[in-house]
Image (spheres, rainbow, N blue to C red):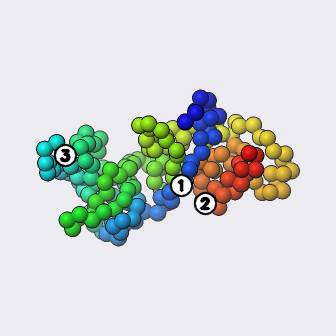
Amino acid sequence: LGIRTVQDLLLHLPRRWEDRTSFRAIGLLRPGAVETVQGTLGSPRTKNPKRGMTILQVPLSDTTGTVYLTWFNQPHVARAWQPGASVVANGKVEENFGELQMSSPELEMGEERIQAGRIVPVYPLTGNMQQKWLRKVMFQIVPAYAPKLPETLPPALLAGQGWPGKGAAVVEYHWPRDFGLRDQARRRLAFEE
């Protein structure tokens, strides 16, 4: 990725974004769609349909229904989440044998929403790096260090175009509050190139 400095990390920009601002009721999930839901975890169940294959399914329920969070050959996932915990899950919804499921969804618990409840960046990756890990790093680094980037454009130009300063543009581009502000940040950063 060519990241050697904090500035390199700040300028490792997302290639796209996913709008995860809306939560869908589990009873309204649409097979084939990528959805974000919130619910309570149930007790996990494990299936071994053939030798060497383990399927872990954890029910996630709200007042409207249940979706099964599913992992293949990852039994350790069951130890990370406790039945009764409230979590947010994001993933592609599928229907198998009359049950809705999400295979290998991204899960998040607690009040701090990095992976859901917001517009989420999708970064270019390499090797075994995972989006969830890089997002957590960027969520800490970008707001702390981007405001320290030196401004390179004259204040009159920024004001005339209605653009934010460089630091604010970098923050908004990584973690946009809405797509209009993201586009404004993109124009600001592109002008400098």
Position of 175 relative to 140 (above/below)? below
Three-letter code for the amino acid on which mark 1 is drawn: Trp
Where residue 173 appears, x then y in whole percent?
62, 50
Residue at left offset 58%, top offset 33%: 2
Quick one: 40 or 24, which is closer to the camera?
24
Q: Quadrant of the C terminus?
A: top right
Distance from disc 2 to disc 3, alpha carbons, whole Å, reads 41 Å
Q: Quadrant of the N terminus?
A: top right
- Pick whichever of labels 3 and 1 is earlier in the sequence: 1
- For marks 2 and 1, give the one nearer the viewer: 1
Quick one: 85 or 190, which is closer to the camera?
190
Secondary element type, mark 3: loop
Using a 10 Å C-alpha cutoff, classify the residue at mark 3 as few (fewer than 14 neighbours), some (14 to 19) or many (20 or more). Answer: some
Residue 112 visible in the shown view: yes
Secondary element type, mark 2: helix
Residue annotated with mark 1: 17
Position of 39 relative to 128 (above/below)? below
Where residue 23 appears, x then y in whole percent?
42, 62
Quadrant hosting residue 90? bottom left
Residue 82 visible in the shown view: no
Residue annotated with mark 3: 54
Marks 2 and 1 in Cβ contact (< 8 Å) = yes
Res. 185 mark:
none
Res. 179 mark:
2
Three-letter code for the amino acid on which mark 3 is drawn: Thr
Residue at left offset 40%, top offset 61%: 34
Marks 2 and 3 in Cβ contact (< 8 Å) = no
- For marks 2 and 3, give the one nearer the viewer: 3
Distance from disc 2 to disc 1, alpha carbons, whole Å, reads 9 Å
